[in-house]
Image (cartoon, rainbow, N blue to C red):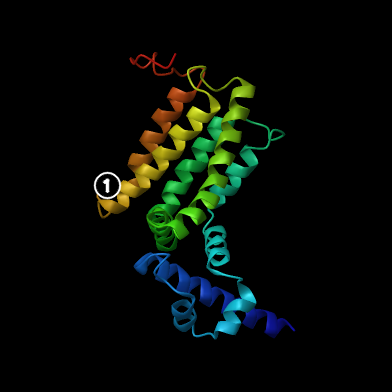
Amino acid sequence: MRRRNDDSQQTRNAILDAAEIGFCERGYAATTLEMISRAAGVTRGAFYWHFRDKAELLAALHARSLLPQEQILAATADAAEPGDPLEQLSRAGIAALRDFEVNQSRQRMFRIMSDLGTGPEGRAALSRLDGELRSLMRRVMQRARDKGSLHPDFTPHEAAVLVHVTFIGLLGEWLRSDRGFPLAEFGEKLVRRQFALLRADGGGWADAGGAGPR
């Protein structure tokens, strides 16, 4: 029984590996289940034993690529979790940048997610997967507001958008520039400065010299 379970897991992993490379190289819409099955060395029947369709396969890829820091993010969103949500999120984000800089699988998955918006099939998948992360981020910022650590210049939604687009933009620019700058080193400076702006005791836009939202 153990051997059978091991073989099943190996088959599943082979399908996921083939899909990750195929989606990254050809795009989500252009990569067919036949291509994935052939690259994985499995039959279509074996594919359907593990995954219902391409959308379920993408969701499994996304789940496999979740950083430990994203698990920290989920815990940080829990209202019962002790500690400062902004500090926890800042540490998790910096650790995620360090991991991303050396992890080619996560880099491929980021490219896949970035390219999903180019077609209706991909946009539907992206909306579902990206929406989960955005919702989680808003919960973290709401918890920071409830604890009094979020600067009043920012609503939880605004703070979540700011952090989300900063990380997405930073990772995207690093890949687009062919790793033209030290991601973890530069990213840590940027993240720490940004979170100082978000803190109730660290200054908002107006305190940093800007007009600030009204």
- Identity of the residue drawn at 45% across and 39% down: 164
Looking at the rendered structure, the kind of residue marked 1 is Phe
Instruction: Inspect this view and state whether residue 184 appears.
Output: no
Give the residue number, with chain letter if any, for mark 1.
181
Residue 74 position (above or below residue 114): above
Task: Measuring from the top left, give residue 82's x and y in whole percent.
Answer: 68, 32
Quarter of the figure that contains the N terminus: bottom right
Query: Which residue sits at x=59%, y=44%?
Result: 72
Question: Looking at the picture, how far across and down is residue 25, in whole percent?
Answer: 35, 68
Residue drawn at the location 57% of the way across and 58% of the way down: 63
Which residue in the rendered view is the most extreme toward the right?
Answer: 1
User: Residue 209: which quarter of the image?
Assistant: top left
Tell me the SS state at disc 1: loop
Q: Tell which of 9 and 186 is nearer to you.
A: 9
**Residue 202 image offset from top left, x and y in percent:** 46, 19
Crowding at label 1, few (<14), some or many (≥20) Cα neighbours within 10 Å?
Answer: few
Which residue ends up furthest to the front in the rendered image? 120
Taking the spot 39% from the left edge, 14% from the top edge, the residue there is 206
* Figure quadrant of the C terminus: top left
**Residue 151 percent coordinates (x, y):** 51, 19
Q: Is residue 117 left or right of residue 199?
A: left
Can residue 156 be seen here?
A: yes
In the rendered view, would you say 86 is above or below 35?
above
Q: Is residue 48 left or right of residue 189?
A: right
